[in-house]
C-alpha cells in the first residue's frame, strides 16, 4: 500500500514529459520519471521516497524503440527486459535481462529504469558498457547523444529533468562471442553476489562486473591483465582479482573476501572458456 | 473392507483452494471497519524516554492512538513477560510500541509517521552465550514476569527463562572411558515462518459487551482464554472465529495480534477494527522460529555402539518466552534421538536475547536439535569407519530400551526405526554415504539423518466432536480443529466416514471453527489433531451409531442389538433383506401410519488426554506425549568442489506413520515438510547486524526456496499401528521437516570434506568451513 496520494501523468511526447516535469518541480511536487515502476512502487510503499507526481514515459513512442538500422540496434528506454530478451537481437543483453528478477518483473522492469534505479546492481549496463553503447538523452538542449561511459560511472549522471530516450548498440556487438555468469548467495533469483559479462572484440576480451563493488564497473587494467594469452587462466584470474581487491564490498549476501573468491573462480572459468574457444 | 480410510481421497477444501474461492480471514468483507497499524521499534534494546503521539492524534481520520501506557497487562502462555505494546523498554527491533486506529489504512500509516519516539539505546544481547555471561544485562530485571504453568523454571537474576534436565545412568564417568569420543559445538540462527497468509485479526465489542474476534489462528480457544484472563472478561462473552488458515507452521499458535485487535476496538468504543500486518512486520514483529546453540559430546565403543552422551542446548527465545520454554523441554524429552543411549545427560536452557521472540515452528525445536545430534553421529560414524546407516541401525532404539524420560520402548508406542532404515535404502539408492565423482570437479553425495518426535501438550489437553445429520442422511462434523493445510479436516472426515461406514462424500466438516459453536479443541498444533480430535470423532460416531440403532430397531421392529449399520443403511442382522436408509431414521422415525418413534440423532464425543505427566525436575523422568513418530531421511547433492556451490538432487523420507490412511495426502504433507526443511537449511535465516537490526527485513532479500528449485521428493511409509490412536495412525504432519537440515548438512560435509555446524548452508559458509576449519 502506498499510504499517500500522488499525481500520475502519461504524456505522449518527450516535450510534454519534460514540460510536466519542470512545472511540477517548480510547484514543489518532487516529480519522478516512471517506466516499469517496480522500484518506485517498492520504495514508496516502504516510505523511502515520496514523489508527489510520477510521469509515466511508457506512452512515448521514442522510448519504445526496438529496431535495427544500418549502424545501430536501438533500444528504447521503456523497453521491458522481457521484450529485449525475447527479441533475441543482442544475445548477451538478452541473457543478462533474463537473469534479473523473475519473469513477472522482467515484464515490468525497463532498460531505462534498470540503468537509472537506485538498486546498485544495474546489470543491463554491463553489456552496454562492453559494446561501447551510446545513449540518447532528452533534456534542456533537446536530444543529445553521448557515449554511455561518459554519463555512467556506475550510476547515471543525468540532469534532474533529463531522461534516457534510447540506447544505441553498434552492430558488431550483436554477433560478438559473449559470456555471462551470475552468482547469488544460494538462490536462483536474487541480487548478484557477482554478475560478470564478457564480450570478445577484435580478439580481445572485454569484461565488466556488477555486485563486487557498490556499483557496476569495467576496468581497463583488469582487461589488460586478462588478455595476457601467454599466462594460464589461473594466473591471469588471480592477477585481475587482485586489482579489484579493494573495491569488494561486504553485505548480508556475502563478504568481500567471498566475493573475491567467486570473482577469481568466475574469471578463471571465463578465461579457460576463451582459451578453449568455447565462447 | 474400508469405506474411507487407506484411500487417497482429495482434501475436502481442494476445489475451493485451487479455484481461489476459499475464504481466508482477510478475504472477509471489511466494509465499515476501522484500520489499525503498528509502530514498531527501530532499536533492538532501548529505554523509551518518551512516545509523543500528539501529532498523530490530531491527524483527521485518526480515531485513537494507543501506547504501552494504555495496557499494563503482561502476556504469555507459560511466563507472562510480554506487554502488548512496549512499556518503558523495547527488547527487539520490530517490537510494537504504538497502535493507531483510523478510518483507513493510509491514514493510519500516515499517523504512524507522526509519532515521535525518543529512545535511549542499550547494548543488545544477540546470542544465548552472550546473555548467559556473568554480568550480562538482565532483559527482564529480577524476574518481572509471572509463571502461568507449573513446570516452568525461570532463574531470577539471570536471562534463563527455563531449564530442563535429563539424567539417566552415569554419563560423566562412562563418557570419559569411551574408545571414541566426538565433541562438537553448533550455532543455528532464527528464521521466519513465512506462511503465504500474513497474520491478521479483527475485533469488535458489542453493546452487550460481547467480544467478537475473527483471526488467522491455530489456537482460537487460547485466544479466548488469554483475553478472558488478562482483561477479566467472562470467557463466555468472547467469541473467536477462525476461517481457513493459509499456512500456520506453528507461527499462528501464539496469541498476539488478537490482543492488539481487542485493545484497538476497546480504544474506539468497541467499533470493528481490522489489524493486518504488512509482510515486513509479519517477519520482524510477529514471533519467529527459534535460534539454537549446542555443545554435543557423544562417546562410543570401538564398534560404534553409543555408550554415553552429554548434551547442552541453549535455545535463543528472543525477547519474550511465548511457548519457548516448552521447546526447550521438547529438546530434552527427545534429546537422544531414536537411539539407545544408556548414559545420558542433557541440559536444555531457554535464554532471553534481543531477537524477535520465538514461538513454535514446524517440528517444535526438533529440526534444530536433530541437526546437532545427527551431524555429530555422522562424525562418529566417520571416526569409527562405519556406514552412517549401519551406525544408526546398530544404535536404534528397540525392545528393552527406555527414552530419555525413561518411558519403556514398545514398537506400538514409538515406532520401528530399523524398518525405516530398511525402506530408505532402495528409496534413496543408499550407497553408504560415499563420494561419487561425476565430472572433474563435481561429486554426488548422499547424507542421512534419522528423527523422532513426541508431543508436549498440557497433561489435561482436550478435544471434542459433535455430529448432526442432514435430511439426505449425510453427516455434519463440528470440531474445534483449524484447517491450515495439514489435512486434518480430511482425515477427520475419513475417520468419521469409516466408523459410520459411509463414503467420505457423505461427511461435511464444518470448515471454520467458532468457539461458541464447536466443542473446545486444545490447539491445532503438535500434529496431534488426528489423534486427539480423531478419538473424539470416533466417540461421537459410536454415540450416533447407538442412537441410530435405537431408531432403526423401532422402525424395523427388532431389538437395537440386532441392528447392523453399513453403507448409509441400518439392517436387521437376522433378516438382512430388511433395512432402512439413514435419511429415514436420522431425525427420528415416522411410521407409515404417522406415528413418531425414537429421537433425532446427535452424536457427541470428547477426549481428555490421559497418562501424561510433568517431568521430574532433576532426572527428567515422565511422559509428555501420547506417542512418538520416527523415520529416516536422505538428501542427495551434486557439489562443485571448485566453487562450493551445490544442487539438491533428491530428498527421501521413510517414516513410520502407523497407518497410511490417506497415502497421497500424507505423501504431500510430508513432502511439504521436506521442502520447508530444505529451504531453511539451504538459505533461510534472520540475519542481524551488531546492533540487532534485521538485515533481511523483506522478501526481496530474505530468500525461500522457489518452485523450479525443488529436488525430487520420495516418500515411503512404515506402518506400525499406534494402539491408542484412530486406526493406528501416528502424528506425521510436521515430521517431514525434522531430519532435512541434518541430512543436507551430512551430505555437504562429506562432499566438501569439512565440518558444517551452522545453518543456512550457503556456498560462502561451506567455503569458510572448508578453507578455515569449522564453519
Image (spheres, coloured by chain):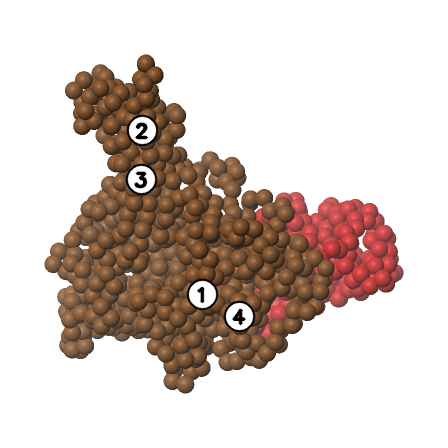
Chain colours: A red, B brown
Q: Mark 1 or mark 2, which has the lower sequence index? A: 1
Quadrant occupied by the N terminus of chain B: top left
Quadrant occupied by the C terminus of chain B: bottom left
Task: Decide if residue B53 is on the left or right side of residue B27.
Answer: right
How many marks are shown on the rendered structure?
Answer: 4
Q: Position of residue B746 (x, y in %)?
A: 32, 62
Give above or below for B568 relative to B9.
above
Q: Mark 1 or mark 4, which has the lower sequence index? A: 1
Q: What chain does badge 3 belong to?
A: B
Q: Mark 2 or mark 3, which has the lower sequence index? A: 2
State if disc 2 and disc 1 touch (CB < 8 Å).
Answer: no
Closer to viewer: mark 3 or mark 1: 3
Q: Position of residue B546 (x, y in %)?
A: 24, 32
Identify the secondary structure beneath mark 4. Answer: loop
- How far apart marks 2 and 3 lie (CA) works out to 15 Å
Q: What chain does badge 4 belong to?
A: B
Closer to viewer: mark 2 or mark 3: 2
> Label 4 belongs to which residue?
B86
Residue furthest bottom as drawn:
B135
Q: What chain does badge 1 belong to?
A: B
> Label 2 belongs to which residue?
B599
> Label 1 belongs to which residue?
B75
Task: Decide if residue A148 is on the left or right side of residue A231.
Answer: right
Q: Mark 4 or mark 2, which has the lower sequence index? A: 4
State if disc 4 and disc 1 touch (CB < 8 Å).
Answer: no
Closer to viewer: mark 4 or mark 3: 3
Sort mark 1 into few (<14), some (14-19) or many (20+) by Cα contacts within 10 Å: many
Q: Position of residue A224 (x, y in %)?
A: 61, 70
Res. B64 in view: yes
- How far apart marks 3 and 1 lie (CA) works out to 34 Å
> Label 3 belongs to which residue?
B604
Closer to viewer: mark 4 or mark 2: 2
Amino acid at each position: 500500500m502506498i499510504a499517500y496520494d500522488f499525481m500520475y501523468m502519461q504524456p505522449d511526447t518527450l516535450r510534454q514529459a519534460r514540460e510536466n516535469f519542470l512545472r511540477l518541480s517548480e510547484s514543489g511536487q518532487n516529480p519522478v520519471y516512471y517506466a516499469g515502476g517496480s522500484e518506485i512502487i517498492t520504495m514508496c510503499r516502504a516510505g523511502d521516497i515520496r514523489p508527489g507526481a510520477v510521469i509515466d514515459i511508457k506512452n512515448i513512442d521514442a522510448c519504445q524503440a526496438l529496431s535495427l538500422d544500418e549502424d545501430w540496434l536501438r533500444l528504447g528506454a521503456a523497453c521491458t527486459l522481457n521484450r529485449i530478451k525475447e527479441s533475441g537481437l543482442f544475445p548477451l543483453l538478452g541473457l543478462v535481462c533474463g537473469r534479473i528478477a523473475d519473469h513477472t518483473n522482467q515484464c515490468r522492469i525497463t532498460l531505462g529504469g534498470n540503468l537509472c534505479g537506485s538498486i546498485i546492481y544495474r546489470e543491463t549496463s554491463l553489456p552496454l558498457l562492453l559494446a561501447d553503447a551510446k545513449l540518447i538523452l532528452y533534456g534542456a538542449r533537446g536530444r543529445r547523444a553521448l557515449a554511455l561511459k561518459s554519463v555512467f560511472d556506475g550510476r547515471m549522471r543525468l540532469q534532474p529533468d533529463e531522461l534516457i530516450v534510447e540506447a544505441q548498440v553498434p552492430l558488431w556487438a550483436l554477433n560478438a562471442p559473449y559470456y555471462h555468469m551470475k552468482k547469488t548467495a544460494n538462490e536462483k533469483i536474487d541480487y548478484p553476489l557477482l554478475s560478470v559479462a564478457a564480450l570478445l572484440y577484435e580478439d580481445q576480451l572485454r569484461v565488466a562486473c556488477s555486485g563486487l563493488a557498490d556499483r557496476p564497473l569495467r576496468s581497463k587494467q583488469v582487461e589488460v591483465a586478462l588478455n595476457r594469452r601467454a599466462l594460464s587462466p589461473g594466473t591471469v584470474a588471480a592477477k585481475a582479482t587482485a586489482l579489484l581487491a579493494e573495491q569488494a564490498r561486504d553485505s548480508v549476501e556475502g563478504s568481500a573476501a567471498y566475493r573475491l573468491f567467486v570473482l577469481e573462480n568466475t574469471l578463471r572459468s571465463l578465461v579457460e572458456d576463451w582459451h578453449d574457444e568455447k565462447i | 473392507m474400508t469405506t474411507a480410510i487407506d484411500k487417497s481421497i482429495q482434501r475436502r477444501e481442494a476445489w475451493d483452494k485451487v479455484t481461489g474461492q476459499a475464504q481466508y480471514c482477510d478475504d472477509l468483507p471489511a466494509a465499515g471497519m476501522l484500520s489499525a497499524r503498528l509502530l514498531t521499534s527501530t532499536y533492538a534494546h532501548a529505554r523509551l524516554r518518551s512516545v509523543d503521539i500528539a501529532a498523530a492524534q490530531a491527524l483527521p481520520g485518526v480515531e485513537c492512538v494507543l501506547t504501552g501506557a494504555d495496557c499494563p497487562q503482561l502476556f504469555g502462555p507459560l511466563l507472562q513477560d510480554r506487554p502488548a505494546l512496549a512499556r518503558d523498554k523495547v527488547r527487539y527491533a520490530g517490537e510494537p510500541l504504538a497502535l493507531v486506529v483510523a478510518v483507513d489504512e493510509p491514514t493510519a500509516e500516515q499517523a504512524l509517521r507522526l509519532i515521535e519516539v525518543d529512545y535511549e539505546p542499550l547494548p543488545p544481547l544477540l546470542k544465548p552465550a552472550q546473555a548467559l555471561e556473568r554480568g550480562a544485562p538482565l532483559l527482564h530485571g529480577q524476574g518481572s514476569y509471572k509463571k502461568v504453568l507449573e513446570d516452568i523454571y525461570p532463574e531470577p537474576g539471570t536471562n534463563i527463562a527455563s531449564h530442563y534436565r535429563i539424567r539417566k545412568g552415569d554419563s560423566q564417568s562412562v563418557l570419559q572411558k569411551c574408545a571414541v569420543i566426538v565433541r562438537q559445538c553448533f550455532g543455528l540462527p532464527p528464521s521466519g515462518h513465512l506462511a503465504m497468509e500474513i497474520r491478521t485479526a479483527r475485533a469488535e465489542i458489542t453493546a452487550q459487551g460481547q467480544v467478537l474476534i475473527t483471526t488467522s489462528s491455530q489456537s482460537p480457544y487460547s485466544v479466548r482464554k488469554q483475553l478472558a484472563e488478562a482483561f477479566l472478561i467472562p470467557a463466555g462473552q468472547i467469541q473467536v472465529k477462525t476461517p481457513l488458515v493459509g499456512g500456520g507452521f506453528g507461527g499462528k499458535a501464539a496469541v498476539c495480534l488478537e490482543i492488539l485487535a481487542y485493545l484497538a476496538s476497546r480504544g474506539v468504543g468497541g467499533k470493528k477494527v481490522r489489524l493486518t500486518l504488512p509482510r515486513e512486520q509479519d517477519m520482524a514483529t510477529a514471533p519467529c522460529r527459534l535460534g539454537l546453540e549446542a555443545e554435543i559430546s557423544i562417546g562410543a565403543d570401538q564398534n560404534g555402539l553409543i555408550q554415553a552422551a552429554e548434551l547442552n542446548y541453549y535455545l535463543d527465545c528472543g525477547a519474550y518466552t511465548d511457548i519457548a520454554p516448552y521447546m526447550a523441554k521438547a529438546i530434552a524429552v527427545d534429546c537422544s534421538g531414536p537411539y539407545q543411549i544408556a548414559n545420558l545427560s542433557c541440559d536444555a536452557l531457554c535464554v532471553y536475547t534481543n531477537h524477535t521472540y520465538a514461538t513454535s515452528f514446524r517440528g517444535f525445536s526438533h529440526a534444530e536439535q536433530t541437526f546437532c545430534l545427527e551431524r555429530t553421529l555422522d562424525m562418529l560414524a566417520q571416526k569409527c569407519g562405519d556406514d552412517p546407516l549401519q551406525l544408526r541401525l546398530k544404535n536404534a532404539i528397540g525392545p528393552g530400551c527406555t527414552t530419555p524420560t525413561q518411558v519403556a520402548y514398545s514398537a506400538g508406542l514409538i515406532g520401528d526405526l530399523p524398518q525405516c532404515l530398511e525402506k530408505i535404502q532402495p528409496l534413496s539408492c543408499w550407497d553408504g554415504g560415499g563420494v561419487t565423482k561425476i565430472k572433474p570437479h563435481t561429486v554426488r553425495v548422499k547424507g542421512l539423518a534419522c528423527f523422532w518426535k513426541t508431543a508436549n501438550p498440557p497433561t489435561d489437553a482436550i478435544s471434542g466432536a459433535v455430529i448432526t445429520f442432514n435430511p439426505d442422511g449425510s453427516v455434519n462434523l463440528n470440531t474445534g480443529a483449524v484447517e491450515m493445510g495439514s489435512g486434518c479436516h480430511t482425515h477427520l472426515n475419513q475417520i468419521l466416514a469409516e466408523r459410520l461406514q459411509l463414503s467420505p462424500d457423505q461427511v461435511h466438516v464444518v470448515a471454520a471453527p467458532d468457539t461458541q459453536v464447536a466443542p473446545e479443541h486444545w490447539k491445532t498444533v503438535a500434529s496431534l489433531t488426528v489423534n486427539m480430535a480423531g478419538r473424539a470423532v470416533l466417540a461421537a460416531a459410536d454415540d450416533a451409531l447407538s442412537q441410530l440403532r435405537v431408531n432403526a430397531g423401532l422402525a424395523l421392529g427388532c431389538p437395537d442389538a440386532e441392528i447392523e449399520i453399513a453403507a448409509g443403511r441400518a439392517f436387521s442382522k437376522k433378516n438382512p433383506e430388511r433395512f432402512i436408509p439413514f435419511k429415514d431414521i436420522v431425525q427420528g422415525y415416522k411410521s407409515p401410519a404417522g406415528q413418531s418413534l425414537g429421537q433425532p440423532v446427535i452424536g457427541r464425543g470428547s477426549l481428555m488426554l490421559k497418562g501424561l505427566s510433568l517431568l521430574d525436575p532433576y532426572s527428567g523422568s515422565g511422559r509428555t506425549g501420547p506417542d512418538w513418530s520416527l523415520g529416516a531421511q536422505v538428501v542427495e547433492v551434486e557439489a562443485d568442489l571448485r566453487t562450493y556451490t551445490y544442487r539438491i538432487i533428491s530428498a527421501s523420507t521413510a517414516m513410520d506413520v502407523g497407518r497410511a490412511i490417506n497415502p497421497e495426502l500424507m505423501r504431500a504433507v510430508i513432502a511439504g515438510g521436506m521442502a520447508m526443511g530444505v529451504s531453511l537449511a539451504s538459505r533461510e535465516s534472520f540475519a542481524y547486524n551488531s546492533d540487532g537490526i534485521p538485515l533481511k527485513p523483506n522478501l526481496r532479500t530474505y530468500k525461500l526456496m522457489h518452485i523450479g528449485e525443488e529436488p525430487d521428493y520420495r516418500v515411503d511409509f512404515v506402518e506400525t499401528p499406534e494402539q491408542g490412536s484412530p486406526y493406528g495412525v501416528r502424528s506425521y504432519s510436521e515430521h517431514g521437516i525434522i531430519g532435512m537440515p541434518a541430512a543436507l548438512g551430512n551430505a555437504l560435509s562429506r562432499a566438501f570434506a569439512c565440518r558444517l555446524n551452522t545453518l543456512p548452508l550457503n556456498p560462502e559458509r561451506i567455503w569458510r568451513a572448508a578453507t578455515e576449519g569449522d564453519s
